[in-house]
Image (cartoon, rainbow, N blue to C red):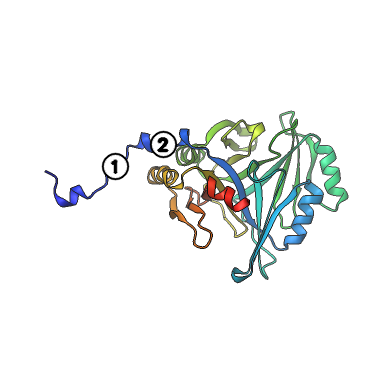
Amino acid sequence: MATGSEASKPAEVPAETVLDWHKQDNKRMLHAVYRVGDLDRTIKYYTECFGMKLLRKRDIPEEKYTNAFLGFGPEDTNFAVELTYNYGVDKYDIGTGFGHFAIANEDVYKLAENIKSKGGKITREPGPVKGGSTVIAFAQDPDGYMFELIQRAETPEPLCQVMLRVGDLERSIKFYEKALGLKLLRKKDVPDYKYTIAMLGYADEDKTTVLELTYNYGVTEYSKGNAYAQVAIGTNDVYKSAEAVDLATKELGGKILRQPGPLPGINTKIASFVDPDGWKVVLVDNTDFLRELH
């Protein structure tokens, strides 16, 4: 017969069961959150230069900040950027770890011309990528965030990448597969330029927003700055998803910052964690997220 202490201990759920949840779940990249020094200036830039739409805006005066959500389609189907303006803060440090966002467009030459004609900054002129045929360009927004512009036939998701630099690519790939059920879509080593990239997503690369992880040979640490904040991912059950994250952190590093549960005031269920490099992810209940939108 079990003693009292043994009887009260919950049975350990096998790792396979915890990770099987990813196959049943309907996870989706929702948005990237970052801070800007002048909300109206960024909204103007993204709508006029990039062709994004302002999807919604909310001011929280008691917390002294305003959010704006922008993207190329409605938030219930498409990825968005969530801009945060903190009252009175007009400048942030992007750090060395954050890489870029990316926009897919059918004509990058035309898009770059449009950006320049509206007073925007192109830091790399359109042209084929080194050693390949894909036409790309780079634009820089007013706060210094970089946007890669990628020529691609029509796509359901033009806002197509969040690129972050990591210190150990294999560890990061394993972490994101295990913690979030992301699929490794492709991996490319570029020895001439001493870096390797991995694309992870929930669908094909040309149909979704991917997390692009970059490993620069020999670089294991980056400064995070205070500008880029996190990516939010929708899930059907934050409690079950957090169990998978917990398993991944125990094996590979990172840690849960906020245990799953409802947010005070709005009751949206969330959980949050950092990966082994310190990049933050927030899990958001899919049903609660849709309720917030409508």
Q: Position of residue 20 (x, y in %)?
A: 41, 34
Q: Residue at x 68, y 60 (%)?
A: 36
**Regarding mark 2 in the picture, which secondary structure is present there?**
helix
Dot 2: within a 10 Å radius of its alpha carbon, few (fewer than 14), some, or many (20 or more) residues? many
Q: Quadrant of residue 105?
A: top right
Q: Position of residue 109 (x, y in %)?
A: 83, 38
Q: Is residue 291 above or below residue 185?
A: below
Examine the rendering and report whether any part of residue 173 can be seen: yes
Amino acid under label 2?
Leu
Tell me the CA gap for discs 2 and 1. 14 Å
Q: Residue at x 11, y 43 (%)?
A: 1
Q: Nearer the viewer, residue 225 or 102?
A: 102
Pointer 2 or 1: first along the chain: 1
Examine the rendering and report whether any part of residue 219 can be seen: no
Q: For mark 1, what is the residue?
A: 12
Q: Is residue 80 left or right of residue 21?
A: right
Q: Nearer the viewer, residue 129 or 113?
A: 113
Q: For mark 2, what is the residue?
A: 19
Q: Residue at x 69, y 58 (%)?
A: 57
Dot 1: within a 10 Å radius of its alpha carbon, few (fewer than 14), some, or many (20 or more) residues? few
Amino acid under label 1?
Glu
